[in-house]
Image (cartoon, rainbow, N blue to C red):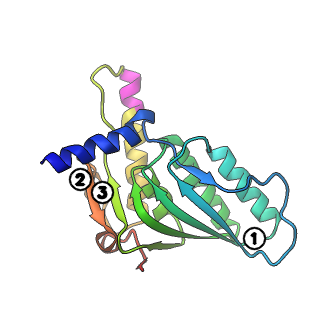
Amino acid sequence: MKLKKLLRILMYSLIVVAAFVAPIIHGNYIQKPLEATALTTYTIIWGEMSGYTTLDFYNKMRVCQESGIKHIEIFLMSPGGIAFDCFGAVDVMEQAKAEGIKFTVKAYGLVASAAVPIFVAADERIAGPNTIFMLHKLEKPSYLSKDDLELYDLTMRLYTSIVDKYCNLTYDEVDKLMTEFTWFTAEQAKRYGMVDEVR
């Protein structure tokens, strides 16, 4: 019980501070199309630091498209991120996929909270054998107004629907996993249909 309590405190320090602590895509910020070299894959490192928005991610995808890059490889280790940027990133990925870009996500260490939808939305999802996944519901403060409660409920429905769309679990099963902090291994995530390959 003490270990579980410590883990909850640790995750709150990483996640709840900003509703879902913001993930960031690290790497060179591209302002113009990449030169037509041998680049066929663009690699992104996605981590835990804040400061990268959906608009930044969209700009990177747009420049990759203009440069003729058809494969985005994301190395993901993240405790989560701001819910709205999570939703926006998934939409950007879906738009890019519809225009011919393939996404491969390789997860190592931790994929938690708002990082999970970004992981499961990829075309190819690979997780290291020691990767830990986590789903949870947002803490619902007692002082929320009626409008805040409506936004809270909408946020959770959208999050649950995205995860449900890309795995073998039903909406109700995903919702049940999110009743509390639910931690699971890469092999369990594979059984849930969230991971294609563990290696």
Instruction: Give the camera-side residue of 38 and 7.
Output: 7
Across and down, in percent, residue 85 comes to: 55, 44
Taking the image as drawn, is residue 194 in sight? yes
Magenta region, residue range: 146-151
Instruction: Give the camera-side residue of 182 and 98.
Output: 182
Mark 3 — residue? Answer: 174
Mark 1 — residue? Answer: 69
**Mark sitting on residue 176:** 2
User: Quick one: SS at disc 1?
Assistant: loop
Q: Give amino acid for label 1.
A: Ile
* Quadrant in the picture for the C terminus: bottom left
User: Quick one: SS at disc 2?
Assistant: helix
Q: Give amino acid for label 3.
A: Val
**Mark sitting on residue 144:** none
> Is residue 17 found left or right of 72 in the rendered image?
left
Residue at 63 percent of width and 66 percent of height: 97
Tell me which secondary structure the magenta stretch mostly adopts: helix
